[in-house]
Image (cartoon, rainbow, N blue to C red):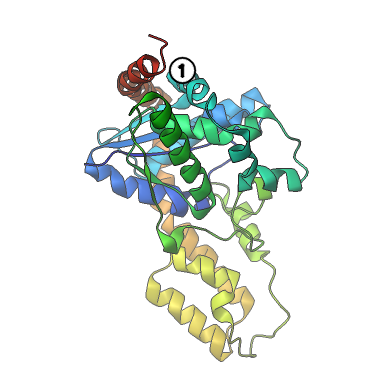
Amino acid sequence: MPRVLTGITPSGALHIGNYFGAMQPAIELQDGGNAFYFIADYHSLAGLTNAKERRAYTQGIALDWLACGLDPEKAIFWRQSDVPEVSELMWLIGSLTPTGLLERAHSYKDKLAKGIGPSFGIFAYPVLMAADILLFDTNVVPVGKDQKQHLEMTRDIAIKFNLTYGETFVVPEEYILEEVAVIPGLDGQKMSKSYGNTVEIFGDEKTLRKKIMNIVMDSRTRQEPKPDAGKNLAVQLMKFVAPAEVAADFEARLRAGGLGYSDLKKGLFEYYWDFFAPYRARCAELAANLDYVEKVLRDGAEKARAVGNKTMDRARLACGLR
């Protein structure tokens, strides 16, 4: 069975873009019995400088993944910083990574364009991501379209190392579900914590309802037909959380006229809130048993290191460090 790996950075509360774009596909793949999932706390250092927040977000991600269906009996689940071998591997492969490759990264250029100051952490993000993947002989990486280029860079880095030192790393393949690859945020851009346009998986009901009800619509009245209803942001989000026939009905009524935007957004909120209701209940149970959550992460790190050390032995030997 191909080995699957994915990770989420603890830089804020998880949102439905994380869930539908990465978590749900990854959790479905855990039944294959060779799934490796981690909390990428090293990656968070590039953008988050509040240590207390990092600890809270890391714990929150652990709760959220377990609440949403990650099964530690089926998948290895750990905190990235509990597997220090990934930092060593980053240096081994980074020593061969051309700076031109990193300069072409869309995410790096996007951050600079948004006024985020350049740093080694932001620049070298693809190398650390490559180390995360290559350390565990990963075959398949579930990624959103925005991460596709980084996965291609991981392949380039692995191939360059293999050509330089001999066959050492498995060259991974991407796994993208086209229908959920990019989840729109409340402003129409890709849903992202860095854009402040998210709908969290868990959170205060009143706050989340207000977020959805504040989605900006055009000025057309309730009775006016809206032939472009398929492009409506609320309709697009409805398709993720409501049964297909329900979402189609809302879209049809919007096209025909007679459905107001307020009713559409109320419907979106109710289906969203109901969709995550069982996960909220499970999250509350886990929050009352944090010792169990910590044990899951410790046990997962021990298993992950056992696998990663075999890769490191090969890599050190290949490049002459042993």
Q: Which amino acid does label 1 sit on?
A: Pro
Q: Quadrant where the C terminus lies?
A: top left
Q: Position of residue 308 (x, y in %)?
A: 35, 22
Q: Which of 300/273 is in front?
A: 300
User: In the image, 300: left or right of 209?
Assistant: left
Label 1: state its secondary structure. loop
**Is residue 229 positioned above or below 171 on the image?**
below
Residue labelled with disc 1: 84
Residue at 53 percent of width and 26 percent of height: 94
Q: Which residue lies furthest to the top in this view?
A: 322
User: In the image, 144: left or right of 314?
Assistant: right
Q: Position of residue 83 (x, y in %)?
A: 43, 20
How many neighbours does mark 1 have within 10 angstroms: few (below 14), some (14-19), or many (20 or more)?
few
User: In the image, 181: left or right of 49?
Assistant: left
Q: Which of 209/311 is in front?
A: 311
Residue at 34 percent of width and 46 percent of height: 27
Q: Where is residue 135 in the image (x, y as percent from the top left)?
A: 39, 27
Q: Position of residue 95 (x, y in %)?
A: 54, 23
**Is residue 32 positioned above or below 187 on the image?**
above
Total marks placed: 1
User: Does residue 10 appear in this view?
Assistant: no
Q: Quadrant where the N terminus lies?
A: top left
User: Does residue 235 appear in this view?
Assistant: yes
Residue at 43 percent of width and 27 percent of height: 164
Q: Which of 218/32 is in front?
A: 32
**Is residue 117 positioned above or below 196 on the image?**
above
